[in-house]
Amino acid sequence: MKNITADELHGKLKDGEKVTIIDVREESEVATGKIPGAKHIPSADIPYSLDKLDKNEHYYIVCHAGGRSSAACEFLINQGYDVTNMTGGMLAWKGEKE
């Protein structure tokens, strides 16, 4: 599984790179703030949301601390998706939140 740190992902955003981020936290967690532009799909909904994802696109997966995003990445990789896990989750995020 590919991994990226919160600082590395923040750098990509600051550099203007087009990245697609999926936040797999629960609604109550996302209400405290998420990475600007991130799509919210709770981890339990990932298996039922594959029709919303494009196998030709790369996704960065984020959760609170890194555990759920890692599990979501494993599932998505097994389904043929190109994903990277953000290690440390939102606990490690020092950038802006929306």
Image: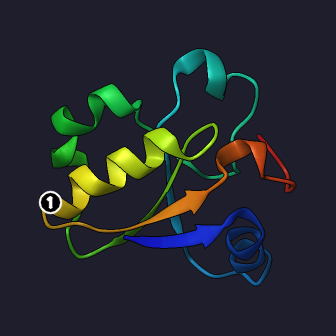
Q: Is residue 26 left or right of residue 30?
A: left
Q: Is residue 85 left or right of residue 76?
A: right
Quick one: which residue is furthest to the top in this view? 28
> x and y percent of residue 6 in the render?
72, 63
- Name the residue located 56 percent from the left edge and 41 percent from the top edge: 63
- Name the residue located 53 percent from the left edge and 31 percent from the top edge: 25
Q: Is residue 67 visible?
A: yes
- Name the residue located 45 percent from the left edge and 39 percent from the top edge: 68
Taking depth in this image into account, of 54 and 67 the one nearest to the observer is 67
* Above or below, comparing residue 66 to residue 20 in the picture: above
Mark 1, other Cα within 10 Å: few <14 / some 14–19 / many ≥20: few
- Name the residue located 18 percent from the left edge and 37 percent from the top edge: 47
> x and y percent of residue 14 in the render?
80, 76
Instruction: Report helix, strand or loop for mark 1.
Output: helix
The colour scheme is: rainbow
- Kind of residue sitting beneath label 1: Asn
* Above or below, comparing residue 76 to residue 4 in the picture: above
* Above or below, comparing residue 91 to residue 30 in the picture: below
Disc 1: which residue: 78
Q: Is residue 53 visible?
A: no
Q: Is residue 86 left or right of residue 9?
A: left
> x and y percent of residue 17 in the render?
63, 82
